[in-house]
Image (cartoon, grey):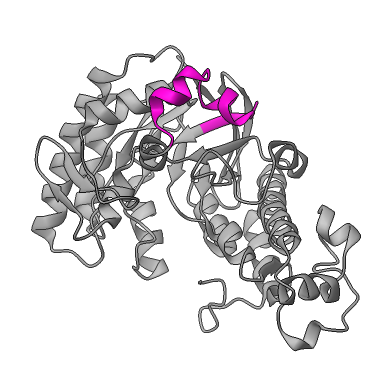
Amino acid sequence: MAITYELLHVCKQSGARLGRIHTPHGVIDTPVFMPVGTQATVKAMSPDELHAIGAPIILSNTYHLYLRPGHDLIAEAGGLHRFMNWSGSILTDSGGFQVFSLEGLRRLTDDGAEFQSHLDGSYHFFTPEKSMEVQNALGSDIMMAFDVCSPYPSSYEDVKEAGRRTHAWALRCQKAHSRSGEQALFGIVQGGMFADLRRWSAQTLVDMDFPGYGIGGLSVGEPKPVMYQMLEEIMPILPSTKPRYLMGVGTPDCLIEGAIRGVDMFDCVLPTRTARTGTLLTSKGRLVVRNAAYARDFGPVDPDCDCYCCRNFSRAYLRHLFKSEEILAARLATWHNLRFLVHLMEQIREAIAQDRLLDFKDEFFTNYGYSAENPQMTY
């Protein structure tokens, strides 16, 4: 098998899992947050800087790389690892979510998805087989099956139809996957916000025996308690011997709550996207460094953070960079936000090992100022 999962410990207090994923490009301690490098780069960060913050794996985007520069060119360069000079592990999504997001520019059939490029309006047809062809050419360590993500809200009938299509496409992906000894293919659980459809999708994919499972179609606008309920419905079904990946989720509260419910892997564009607008994650809550209150604040962004930005620069300096529209502003803010989430996962793993993750959650939420009545970790 291309990857293996090693379950090290289950938190007696919360049921969270401490584990390791062994891939062709290294070992990943879990639970883990994966920075998103949509177009073969994590915006504003070099590969050396990603290693410095402790990121063992990043995510890249099949849809975007297919359109530009093209998977054939990346294969000619020696694969995505060589093309972007990244020695760690890489997960590629299938392109399904991007096609889903192109409302008005795509049409779904049982065969696949026809869509228009957001770059030039040209027409393309993606099938499960095409997604496998592209991801095999990219050479990622972990690939995702081509799926159908239902918007929120959707009717029961529409979600069930999307699930049926997702399951049929998952089988086609397995048959088309040509490098199973080098790349692991994960199935994706769908089912919208309907508990029975979630359980049905999870069991159907488990019966297909994938080496790992993505959990898709969440964090698409539903209330967070609903997302947590859907996780609780499927976790007893997903094998304890394989990794579980909650797709597109990355706020601090969701990372903690997801880990408590047995999630091993997370990704999200939140830390990089909000960094570029001057919104920073800190142990005391969100900090909008552009605000005038920080013009003469010569302390670090977060005194509890060990990142390059916090060790060397002040809030006043970072505000000056943003107000001056200097490129370094985005770089330093991105460095900080990514390190904040990577460090949060380190703290989560430590708390799991010590059987105290629920205590850690309470401490973190209190310091962050988060409560159900004040959900400031929602962006």
119 is higher (above) or lower (below) than 183: below
Which residue sits furthest top? Answer: 181
Residue at 11 percent of width and 48 percent of height: 161
| In front of the other: 207 or 101 | 101
Residue 230 shows in this picture: yes
Residue 6 point in image, percent of width and height: 56, 26
Residue 262 point in image, percent of width and height: 49, 46
* Residue range highlighted in magenta: 69-90
Residue 107 point in image, percent of width and height: 13, 50
Residue 355 point in image, percent of width and height: 67, 48
The quarter of the image holding the N terminus is top left
Residue at 58 percent of width and 42 percent of height: 41
In this image, 372 relative to 54: left or right?
Answer: left
Residue at 22 percent of width and 60 percent of height: 103
Q: Residue 124's quadrant in the figure?
A: top left
Does the magenta run of residues contain 89?
Answer: yes
In this image, 48 relative to 184: left or right?
Answer: right
Which residue sits furthest bottom? Answer: 292
Does the magenta run of residues contain 97?
Answer: no
15 is higher (above) or lower (below) than 305: above
Residue 6 shows in this picture: no
10 is higher (above) or lower (below) than 371: above
Which residue sits furthest front? Answer: 120
